[in-house]
Amino acid sequence: MTKIKWEWTIPNVLSLFRLALIPAIVATYLTDQPIWVPALLLALSGLTDLFDGAIARHFNQISEIGKLLDPIADKLTQVAVIVSLAIKIPPLRWLVGIVVLKELLQGIGGLLLLRTDVKVHAAEWFGKISTVLFYVVMVAIVVFPEMPQALLYTLIVLVALAMIAAFAGYCRTFCRLRSDAKKTHDIKEITQ
């Protein structure tokens, strides 16, 4: 199994900060704080997600732990946010199933890859687009909870389609990585 060590880098600290924001986002939204508070915290979470990757690439602070920590923070944030919002906004409830199933299956796939000593890869562009769209739509729903139903359903469908497309992209990546790992394993067995 791959050994991953902790590295104190700005991107990793931003990912930890994003994890710490999760209970604050949920608590401020569910306890009827002024609407700008959970919206601001959610937007801050989205911005730190955007900046941690950019900082990691620009300052050469990409790390194996960061490649794991960033998507974990994304997944936990998305699940916590969608469940919290669905409590108050019933049309979001069916999206909870899509989010939870997608994140659960991707988490299992990631664990399977780790067990085969496959090097951890950074998030793909389609996953980032899906995440950005998720943050933008969820902030909009928090800020405008009384938006017209047609707009609300349109935004929900957009997020669902982006998540499904990202999941399909990650399935292709997973299959390619597993195939590459199997070929490498077969070559090692032949040469031994």
Image: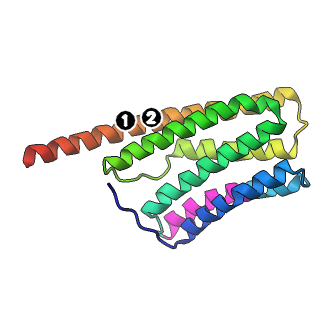
Q: Using the image as rendered, state which of residue 185 and residue 170 is in the foreground.
A: 185
Horizontally, residue 153 falls left or right of residue 192, namely: right
Please state the horizontal and vertical placement of residue 103, each as a whole percent of the image.
Answer: 56, 40
Please state the horizontal and vertical placement of residue 144, each as a whole percent of the image.
Answer: 88, 42
**Residue 137 seen in this snapshot:** no
Residue 36 in which image quadrant: bottom right
Q: Residues within 10 Å of mark 1 (few under 14, many from 20)?
A: few
| Residue plotted at (86% across, 46% down) | 143
Horizontally, residue 159 falls left or right of residue 191, namely: right
What secondary structure characterizes most of the magenta part?
Answer: helix
Magenta span: 43-59
Q: Which mark is residue 21?
A: none
Query: What amino acid type is highlighted by mark number 2?
Result: Cys
According to the picture, the residue beneath numbered tag 2 turns out to be: 171
Q: How is the image coloured?
A: rainbow
**Residue 24 seen in this snapshot:** yes
Do callouts 1 and 2 mark residues in contact (Cβ within 8 Å)?
yes
According to the picture, the residue beneath numbered tag 1 turns out to be: 175
Q: Quadrant of the N terminus?
A: bottom left
Query: What amino acid type is highlighted by mark number 1?
Result: Cys
Residue 37 in which image quadrant: bottom right
| Residue plotted at (62% across, 62% down) | 51
Please state the horizontal and vertical placement of residue 93, each as a whole percent of the image.
Answer: 74, 31
Q: Residues within 10 Å of mark 2 (few under 14, many from 20)?
A: some
Please state the horizontal and vertical placement of residue 125, each as a whole percent of the image.
Answer: 52, 46
